[in-house]
Each structure stands twice: as structure tokens, then as C-alpha cells.
Image (cartoon, grey):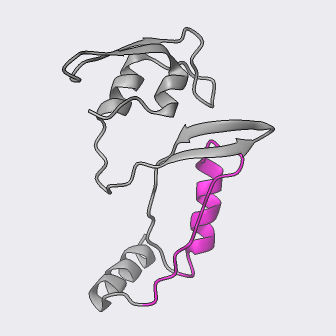
Amino acid sequence: MAPPDTAELQFATDIDISSDGLTYTATLRQDATFHDGSEVTAADFVYRRNRPSASGLDPEAIHHWEGEIHTDDEELLPAKTTDERYPALCDRVVELHPYDVPCVERFDETAVLDSFGNWRAESIDGA
């Protein structure tokens, strides 16, 4: 099991690790909250330790915001769309995202399998 990371340490007053390294006991801070003010619970902590990462990416953002350094977990959402629908996708992400300044990045594809490109266009046009 990986050692506690910076984000986990922000939510706990201490984390004890058993001698075999298989059991972690965390004492959560009483005032631990997420960026939206909701309470951090033991279930949140367990989920963070055990969630799968199918893409192999589990980014942690360390950034400067409103005069302070923040460390947040991030979720990557690869969204496949067409050039024509990209502006609408961006608008929807901004509308739904909890951050004031969400990160939306575009990766232009220069080579795509025809079968995938056709499926994507048909799926989006039919939406």
C-alpha cells in the first residue's frame, strides 16, 4: 500500500501504519472539509485509498489560488467530441464544474482510425 500522500495528510491529525504495512489507521480532523464545504468522512478517506484508477492516471494538483497553496485530487475526463460540438462541451463543463476556473484542455487528433472517427461523429450527431 502506498504511503499517505499530501492530500490525505491535510484531512488527518495523524496516520498510524501497522508494522506489516497493511493496516492504516487515520484520525480525521474534526474540521476537515472539501473545497465546497462538505464534511470529509471516514468513507471518503477509505474510498480515496482504495479507488481503482483505470486510466493509470491519478493526478494530484498543487496550485496557487487566491493567495494560498492548495493540493487537490483531480479527475481526468477524456471527452470525445467533434470540432463543431467542442464549444458546447466546454460550456457544459464550465456550467457543471465546482471550480471557478476549471481546466479544460483540447488535444487535437491528427490521426484517428476511420472506424472510430465515424462512430464518434455518428454518436454525437445522433445525440
Numbered circles on residues, count: 0
Q: Is residue 25 rendered to the left or right of residue 85?
A: left
Residue at (37%, 74%) from the top-left corner? 123
Residue 32 x %, y % = 56, 17
Quarter containing the C terminus? bottom left
Residue at (53%, 12%) from the top-left corner? 29
Chief SS of the magenta region = loop
Q: Is residue 80 rendered to the left or right of residue 49?
A: right
Q: Magenta segment range?
A: 83-110
Q: In this picture, is 36 found above or below 112?
A: above
Viewer-side residue, 17 vs 11: 17
Residue 90 x %, y % = 61, 64
Corner quadrant of residue 78: bottom left
Outermost residue on the front side: it is 19
Residue 58 x %, y % = 40, 48
Residue at (56%, 46%) from the top-left corner? 61
Outermost residue on the right side: it is 67
Q: In this picture, is 79 found above or below 24?
A: below
Q: Is residue 121 rendered to the left or right of residue 108?
A: left
Residue 86 x %, y % = 57, 73
- In magenta segment, residue 103: yes
Residue at (30%, 88%) from the top-left corner? 113
Q: Is residue 18 rendered to the left or right of residue 63?
A: left
Q: In this picture, is 83 found above or below 25?
A: below
Quarter containing the N terminus? top left
Viewer-side residue, 68 vs 81: 68
- In magenta segment, residue 93: yes
